[in-house]
Image (cartoon, rainbow, N blue to C red):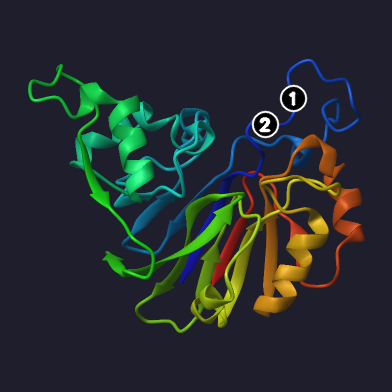
Amino acid sequence: MVKLTFLGTGTSCGVPTIGCQCEVCQSTNPKDKRLRTSALVETGTTRILIDCGPDFRQQMLSQPFRRIDGILITHAHYDHMGGMDDVRPYCQFGEINVYADPLARQGLLQMLPYCFAENRYPGVPAIQLHELHKHESLRIGDLDIMPIEVMHHDLPILGYCITQHSSPLTLTYITDMKTIADTELPYIADSEVLVVNALRFTPHHSHQTVEEAVSFARRVGARHTYLIHGSHHIGLHDETCRKLPPGVELAYDGQVIEMG
């Protein structure tokens, strides 16, 4: 069985947004509180984190404290890797293996130079940084991961197709996408669960709208689709979910999905 936990489902500013008095930011419904987007993918023996944003510490306080076998970075923006220093407590289990494309790898080296210095300050995170490229698969524990490429406006970033060895069911996780090449679609055609970004209902230059995300989900044909990376402009969680077609829902922080 593969378990997916949504640690955060919000856009770069989070929800509530500082200084905003809209009905979403003032909502008392926990499903309208959205930390920066991140997720845990777990089996009985393996634990992978997708993105490590600035809310990582807060997100992990509610999770069991055990080893993280790998961190998959989607791209080199702060809201997706700004919490990397907070992995320090997990280094007691050994080095943290972090996987990123060349741009994100360079961003991590610049953001955390003290972690990669020849003479490291005692107590800094012990990070083993690995370079990833699209369509070059890797195995972490009992999970197989295939990186795919999507476009965040004109920035190529990574999405991930994840499958457990013993199961044919595929989880596809994509965030911050605006477009995707048709050549990437065969890699995600058999997805049982699709996680994909939907910023709001009105157009944005580098993120999908809700309508674009729903259209993409139909192209993929996934059985279940969960929308992430939403801003306060996407509306109240429960009201937005009622507007979505069957098989598509707005994910919320703390939601757990089990496959298999």
Residue 103 rendering spot, x and y as whole percentages: 37, 44
In this rendering, the answer to whether 32 lies above or below 48 is above
Toward which corner of the image does residue 195 lie, by quadrant? bottom right
In this rendering, the answer to whether 88 lies above or below 136 is above
Query: Mark 1: which secondary structure?
Result: loop
Residue at screen point 53% across, 34% down: 79
Q: What residue is disc 1 on?
A: 17
Residue 163 rendering spot, x and y as whole percentages: 42, 73
Does residue 260 show up?
no
**In the displayed structure, does residue 215 sit left or right of residue 140?**
right
Q: Which amino acid lies under the numbered mark 1 shown in the image of this protein?
A: Thr
Query: Nearest the camera: 50 or 47?
Result: 50
Q: What residue is disc 2 on?
A: 14
Residue at screen point 38% across, 42% down: 104
**In the displayed structure, does residue 128 sit left or right of residue 47?**
left
In this rendering, the answer to whether 132 lies above or below 222 is above
Query: Nearest the camera: 125 or 63?
Result: 125
Residue 176 rendering spot, x and y as whole percentages: 60, 49
Tell whether label 2 touches label 1 (CB within 8 Å).
yes
Tell me if mark 2 has few (under 14), some (14-19) or many (20+) residues whose alpha carbon lies within 10 angstroms of its own.
many
Which label number is shown at residue 82? none
Number of residue marks: 2
Query: Mark 2: which secondary structure?
Result: loop
Residue at screen point 84% across, 38% down: 233
Tell me if mark 1 has few (under 14), some (14-19) or many (20+) residues whose alpha carbon lies within 10 angstroms of its own.
some
Given the current orientation, which residue lies at the most extreme left position?
119
For the residues labelled 1 and 2, the Cα–Cα distance comes to 6 Å
Q: Which amino acid lies under the numbered mark 2 shown in the image of this protein?
A: Gly
